[in-house]
Image (cartoon, rainbow, N blue to C red):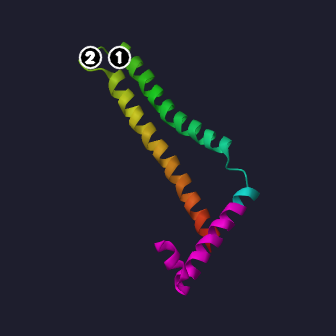
Amino acid sequence: MNENLEIKNPKNRTTFSKEVSIKAARKLKAKRNPKQGVWFGLGMMGLIGWSVVVPTLLGAALGIWLDNRNAGSHSWTLMLLVIGLVIGCLNAWHWVDKEEKEMRDEQEDSDE
């Protein structure tokens, strides 16, 4: 009920109509450009997954190789596995941040 009172105000009505037109334009643009659908999302999940897995496995493999060459008091495998995991997570964060910025920029362009 309170929302109906706000829409009756001319200033709020123009703001409301602008928001509706922006959302409608965004939906029409999404229908015209279906490139970012389900497959795009699955591809991004795969990219993010591999960007974490590859450095982790490389770190573990290098650690195993070093442990076999140099028997010491600490485990190279565990240390390099954790370092690889951290590098992979930073890499995944970079990809997600990049895609989010691109989506935000695209949304700002369509809002204008």
Please state which amino acid type lies under the numbered disc 2. Answer: Gly
User: Residue 90: percent from the left, percent from the top?
Assistant: 43, 43
> Toward the viewer: 59 or 18?
18
At a point 58% along the width and 58% down the height, the residue shown is 103
Comparing 58 with 3, the one in front is 3
Residue 67: which numbered mark, if any? 1
Give neighbour class at mark 2: few <14, some 14-19, many 20+ (Cα, 10 Å).
few
Q: Are marks 1 and 2 in contact (CB under 8 Å)?
A: yes
Three-letter amino acid code at disc 1?
Asp
Residue 105 versus residue 62: which sits nearer the camera?
105
Find disc 2 in the rendering and name its residue.
Answer: 72
6 relative to 108, above or below: below
Query: What is the crowding at mark 1: few (fewer than 14 residues within 10 Å), some, or many (at least 20)?
Result: some
Closest to the observer, 61 or 26: 26
Magenta residues, start to end: 1-28
Q: Please, which residue is most extreme toward the left here? A: 73
